[in-house]
Structure formats: C-alpha cells, structure tokens
Amino acid sequence: MIAQSPSTRLPGLLYGTLILLLATAFYVIFGTTFIKRPHNTLSMFPSKAYGYADRLNVVFPERKERPIKVLYWTTLWGNRKDWKFETSIARECPVLNSVCKFTTDHRQYNDSDVVLFHIGSSYEIPKYRPSFQKWVFVIIESPFNTHRYLSQERWLYNITMTYTRVSDVSFVYGECRRRDPNATKKPVKYNYAQGKKHLVAWFVSNCNTQSKREVYARELAKHIDIHKFGCGGKHSCPRTKEAYCDTVLLNQTYKFYLSFENSLCTDYITEKVYRILDLNVVPIVLGYSHYSDLLPPYSFIDVRDFDSPKSLAVYLEMLSNNDTEYNKYFAWKETHKCRRMPGPACNLCRYVQRQRQRTQVADVVEFWDHNTNCIDAKQFYHDMIAV
C-alpha cells in the first residue's frame, strides 16, 4: 500500500468539510424556516405559469403546542376546590380537555402559563414572574365592596375575569339562553299561582347596604305583606336547609321574591336573581343593570318601572288576584333556559388559547373603580324614596 502524503489528503478534507457546511446551512435556512410553520407548504418548483407541467408540494407535520397550564394561586370563597374548572370543562367544553390543564400545586408556578388570583382572598403575591406567564384578575363581588383590595395591585394583571360584560373573560352568576327551536318545550297549561298562599318573601343577611335596598323594602312593606327572613325579620329558615327553603318553602308558598342587590353597580346581577329563575317564583329586581339585555322578557319585575313602592304594591296585588296575568311571567320557560354559575373555565381556556402571545397589562384600579362602575343610591332612586 502506498501512503498518501498530507498534501494529497488535504483537498479531500476540504471538500468533505465544505459539503458538511453546505448541508448545515441548507438545514438552518430552509429546515428551520419551514418546519416551524404548522402545515406550511413548500413549493420546490415554479408553477405552470412558467412552463412547468407539475408543481411539487411538500407538507411538513404540524408542531403541536403543549397544554396550557393554569395554576390556582388563591382560594375561591375560602377553598381551592371551589374553582372546579376541570369539572366545568369536562361538562361544557370537553374538546378543550387537552388544551388546558389545572393545578393547585404552587411548586408548578415556574411552569404555569396562567395564574389565577381571586381578589379578596388572602394571599401573598409571588416575588417574580416568568416572562411568558399571564396573571388573571378574578373577582365577582361588586367594586363597591372590593375596590379597597386593589391599592397595591394596579399594574399586575394581564387578564380580567369578572361578571361585567367588558371583562376579557366572563365569570357570571348565571345566564339565560334561548332553547333550541327544534327542542322548544311545548306549552303546558299549568297554574303557577295554585297553592301559593303568601305574596312576597325576602331572605336577607346584609342589613346595611350601599344600594339602600333595606329602605326600599321597608317602604314597600307599608303597602303589602312581606315575609322577611333575617335582619330582624319575623320569619326564619335555617341556612343549613337551603334546599328546603328554596324548593319547598319558597317555591310552593310564595308568588314573589325580592331579588334586591346589595350594590348598585353595572352588570351586577347575582344569584339572588338566577336562583329564583330556577324556581316558579317571580323575582322583583333592584339593581343598576340592564336586566332586559340579560334576562328573558317578562321573567322579572323591575322596581324602576314604578314611580314608588306603593305603585309597585298595587301592581303586585293585581297580579296576585289575577292568575292569568300572573302566569304570563312564566311563559318564558317554554322558550328560554336559565342556569346558575356557568363555569368560566371554557371562556378562560379559549381566551388564553387565542391570546397566547398577548402581553398587555390592565390597570385594575381604573377598571374596577367603584365611582365609575357604581351609582349612588340617591341618584338611583330619584323621587321613589328618600335615602
């Protein structure tokens, strides 16, 4: 065997190195450009317009993103289990089961894409935040009752999740929707007044409110019989027997219920309304919301439609003495369906999925300002009552 001299081997090494460099450059320029684009089509040859008979398309496989990890940093109403977002997604939008994953484990903070903070719960704000992470401002109490919590948290949150219609993500106490026209319930001749021997019920625990609902109720009681449960009322039903209080006592013996909100704030419609719509009782609403935008027609009675508590009492007495007119307030059940506390998890998961790259920060102090979101009781009542 004749040994090759170094000068003989050098061109071979140069050619090999050159080929390797060209292959690497090709991969960097073309491979990373096109492989990163899901279902991107790369044209290897000019089109027929340039005289070629065929066009070769190469489709690269779609790159799947990992699930969005959502961390409950705080409790909701005192218990982390109350979030129940996993259950909500499984029930209402199972297609998103693989898109969002939820955890209560603070040790997974560094890897979490989204972190939920329920304002009003007791918690310590993390000292740092990964650049990709989004913090969610969660609140479903009125600004009047919660704005005091926000003085130190003005520029922390990327996403707002509240009951208001201007929030990034909707978290409402209830919702009403039209039934499927093909599945609309057939009218049933049923007398909703039958067996109801009492007029108005009111279950109340907060006795001194921003809405001054207690003042309006006191004036109304001068003209019509109101059975008041709580706050010094003469009637009682244990909170431990809530199901009985609603489905038996209230549903079967009362015609009307005072669904009076404790705060006069935009879009603030709570379980006080949706809980009653579940029953066969007519809610009398008091709040600073456009109820007709959110509730079925003829499903409620608004105190603002009457110039005084006395005129409302006269109307209620008329309905009580006329079953035909009273039953009109239940016709909506044939065309609509209302439910309490629809889970916000589906809304949150869809929003984060669409806005994954969005990094805006909300000024929550301005967003949740009680002076712009709520109205003073004197302005609300005008000349109806003196407050």
Image (cartoon, rainbow, N blue to C red):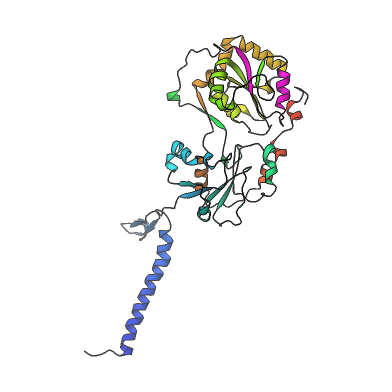
Q: Residue at x 70, y 47 (%)?
A: 151
Magenta highlight on residue 209:
yes
Q: Quadrant of residue 292?
A: top right
- Residue 182 as seen in the image, left or right of residue 112: left
The number of discs equals 0
Whether residue 307 is visible to the viewer of this picture, yes or no, is no
Q: Quadrant of residue 44?
A: bottom left
Q: Quadrant of residue 325?
A: top right
- Extreme-left residue of the structure: 1
321 over 48 or under it: above or below:
above
- Extreme-top residue of the structure: 321
Start and end of the magenta stretch?
195-221
Q: Residue at x 39, y 70 (%)?
A: 24
Tell me the quarter of the image containing the N terminus: bottom left
Magenta highlight on residue 345:
no
Tell me the quarter of the image containing the C terminus: top right
Toward the viewer: 69 or 201? 201
Residue 285: x and y in percent read: 64, 24
Whether residue 364 is visible to the viewer of this picture, yes or no, is yes
Toward the viewer: 262 or 350? 262
376 over 335 or under it: above or below:
below
Q: Residue at x 43, y 58 (%)?
A: 36
Toward the viewer: 59 or 81? 81
Residue 350: x and y in percent read: 50, 43
Toward the viewer: 146 or 68? 146
